Image (cartoon, rainbow, N blue to C red):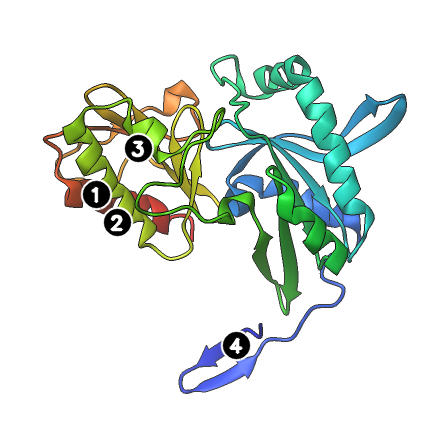
Amino acid sequence: MPIYKINKTKAAQISLKEDGFGSEAELRDFFAENLDEILGVRFIEKEYPINYGGIDYRIDTLGIDENNTPVIIEYKWKENEEIFSQGKCYFNWLVKNKPHFELLVDKKLGAKTKVNWEQPRVILIAQGFSRYILGAVQQEKNIELKTYIYYEPDILQIENIYSPAEIKTSKKNGGKREAGEYNLEYHLSITSPKMQKIANSLRLKILELPNVKENFGKSGIFYRTTKSFARLEFRPTWIQLLIREPHYRSDVQQIVKDVTSNEWGYKGMIKFTPDSDVDYVFNLVKESYESTL
């Protein structure tokens, strides 16, 4: 999709910068330096050496996202068929070496950061993906595909090509729950009937925002664009609502609590109760959402 620069009433198409990143290493290092800003992922390691099945490999980037979920990122400078099999290989190593990864997190971020193993992520980034990869990834629950385009003079566009979160669920009920799966029904059953009603009211408002994906995990429901911006964790009589920042201009009632020191990834927390003003809370969630765009 072309990008245009606007000068008053005139539009000029921005040209592609063919040699944008001089090498795959330059691409990797740029993302490593800007991981939180671009993907909402905190950096752990790059070019990390592993041995899996008696063979030595190097993982481009290891990180952890706002939900404290492990993230593996693999880059290809152009288009490369190997990236998909590499991602699956590294994912298998990760899930078989959980204590090892947790030690890396402790060393980098501190012992307060508790790793969330509900749905580890593998993000594959390249200039494009073949039809075989696009077909094969459709059944993958942990792999995401993103492309990048480098424009003149220094503009980078990231496009989400595939994410497991794009598997559609009903806004009404989140789909039927199967054994071992977590959905809206599972989470609502934790809390009171009155809390269920206002929680679903907030959820429907969030889902009306453009390009929002909803994910269900054991510990809660979270919402993301390219980055996570809100998480609902259900209690018997209230909901813990986590958002990106500890302070918002519109929070004149000062209901957002600063939980930065908890190292949860999210820095703000709202105690969402049956007495909460849903519209007021939604406006705070919307500010958190807008900070990811």
Instruction: Please give the residue where the numbered disc 3 appears in the rendered image.
Output: 246
The reply to whether dot 4 and dot 3 touch (C-beta < 8 Å) is no
The reply to whether dot 1 and dot 2 touch (C-beta < 8 Å) is yes
- The disc at residue 205 is 2
- Kindly report which numbered mark, 3 or 2, lies closer to the viewer in this rendering: 2
Alpha-carbon span between mark 4 and mark 3: 35 Å
- In the figure, 124 relative to 272: above or below? below
Q: Amino acid at mark 4?
A: Tyr
- Kindly report which numbered mark, 4 or 1, lies closer to the viewer in this rendering: 1
Relative horizontal placement of residue 204, taking residue 51 as reference (left or right):
left
Looking at the picture, how far across and down is residue 51, in whole percent?
83, 22
Alpha-carbon span between mark 2 and mark 4: 32 Å
Which image quarter: residue 247?
top left
Relative horizontal placement of residue 4, taking residue 276 as reference (left or right):
right
Along the line of sight, the residue nearer the viewer: 109 or 216: 216
In what element is the residue under mark 1?
A: helix
